[in-house]
Image: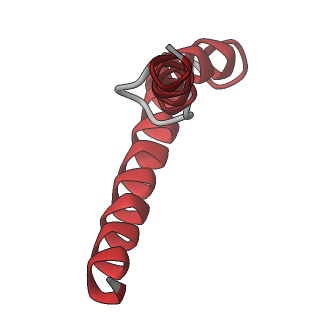
Amino acid sequence: MGYLSSVNLLLAAFNLLPAFPLDGGRALRAVLWHFLGLERATRVTTGLGHATAAAFLVLGVLADLSG
């Protein structure tokens, strides 16, 4: 049960990353919308989503090479 709880918390934390397709990205876009407008807020959060995807890609390759 403890293992499943840990995995569930890890998935929840991942989902709250401020990358656009994830819920954290949608929440960030909603906050930025008030300051930047919808189009600019969407551009900012999709850029963060792309950067997050690239970072995970690099981390995955580095983890594979090291181990």
Along the viewing direction, whichever of 25 and 29 lies nearer the viewer? 25
Residue 20, by quadrant, is top left
Q: Quadrant of the C terminus?
A: bottom left
- In the image, farthest residue toward the front: 1
Along the viewing direction, whichever of 5 and 59 lies nearer the viewer? 5
At which x and y percent is residue 64?
27, 78
At which x and y percent is residue 56?
38, 59
Does 63 sit left or right of 19 as displayed? left
Describe the colour scheme in one phrase. secondary structure
Q: Residue at x 35, y 63 (%)?
A: 54
Q: Residue at x 56, y 34 (%)?
A: 18
- In the image, farthest residue toward the bottom: 66
Q: Residue at x 57, y 28 (%)?
A: 13
In this rendering, is residue 59 above or below 53?
below
At which x and y percent is residue 50?
36, 51
Residue 36, by quadrant, is top right
In this rendering, is residue 40 above or below 61?
above
Q: Residue at x 49, y 46 (%)?
A: 48
At which x and y percent is residue 51?
43, 57
Along the viewing direction, whichever of 42 and 53 lies nearer the viewer? 53
Does 67 sit left or right of 48 as displayed? left
